[in-house]
Image: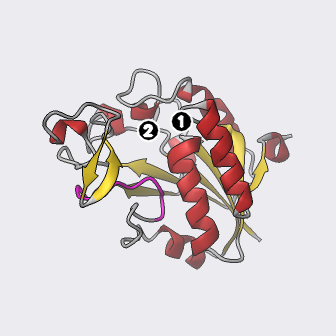
Amino acid sequence: MTKALLLIDIQNGFCPGGNLPVPAGDTIVPVVNALMASGHYDLIVASQDWHPANHGSFASMHPGKQPFEMGMLSGKQQVMWPDHCVQGTHDADFHPNLDISRIDYIQKKGENPDVDSYSAFRDNDQTSSTGLHTYLFEKGVTQLDIAGLATDFCVKFSALDAIELLPGVTTRFVQDASLGIDPQTVEAAIAEMQSHGVHVITSSTIVG
């Protein structure tokens, strides 16, 4: 059995002080570091939101639009986000306390300005793959634990894609190593993940 840990977007932009912060998002970092140090995993992968400065999901690219309003991107409904995780900026860097020395592979996402990318596996229109599922398949991964930011967006969509794109792989969501934006949407996200076959665990399952 090859066990992998997939860390979703544990970046400055999604932590307090960032441009699109998850409340208390930085508090998961010690839990994540403990998971990485546990020796449980054969492979540790991290996704990194990596937007060009002109990304179409940014409200700043749509005159008259404010962050968090709904707009259109490539003909589809799209939340207009604040500029965040722009390539090469501090906002896009991993959180400074995250032990990146233990990460084996980094999967960048969100590079196409014409489509948003919540999932680490593919763009939101589901036509363009990042190649991550192929990488994990080639590594022989049989169990995939997913944690990070934010539970109700990028973590959820990554977990759902893992179920679809990695058939036969046991996919688990590490609840206390993840945080979301809103308690109600977090609860709904967890229920949706479970309904699609994602197992919900806590870090105590791994680190005792």
Give the image's coloring scheme. Answer: secondary structure
Q: Which residues are magenta?
A: 111-121
Q: Residue at x 41, y 67 (%)?
A: 130
The amino acid type, in three-letter code, at marker 1 is Leu
Tell me how far mark 2 sits from mark 1, CA to CA: 7 Å
Q: Name the side, left or right, on which 104 lies relative to 140.
A: left
Please say whether residue 149 is visible from this viewpoint.
no
At which x and y percent is residue 44?
Answer: 60, 55
Quickly name the residue at label 2. 94
Quarter of the figure with the C terminus: top right
Q: Are marks 2 and 1 in contact (CB under 8 Å)?
A: yes
Q: Residues within 10 Å of mark 1 (few under 14, many from 20)?
A: some
Q: Is residue 167 above or below residue 63?
A: below
Answer with the quarter of the image where residue 71 lies. top left
Q: Secondary structure at mark 2?
A: loop
- The mark total stands at 2
At which x and y percent is residue 24?
Answer: 56, 23
Q: Name the side, left or right, on which 121 lies relative to 50.
A: right
Q: Residue at x 36, y 71 (%)?
A: 128
Q: Is residue 132 above or below residue 78?
A: below
> Which residue is outermost to the right?
208
Q: Residue at x 25, y 41 (%)?
A: 58
Quickly name the residue at label 1. 98
Q: Which mark is residue 137?
A: none
Judge whether residue 11 is colored magenta. no
Please say whether residue 141 is visible from this viewpoint.
yes
Q: Secondary structure at mark 1?
A: loop
Is the stretch drawn in magenta largely helix, strand or loop? Answer: loop
At which x and y percent is residue 120?
Answer: 48, 58
The amino acid type, in three-letter code, at marker 2 is Phe
Q: Residue at x 50, y 39 (%)?
A: 10
Q: Residues within 10 Å of mark 2 (few under 14, many from 20)?
A: many
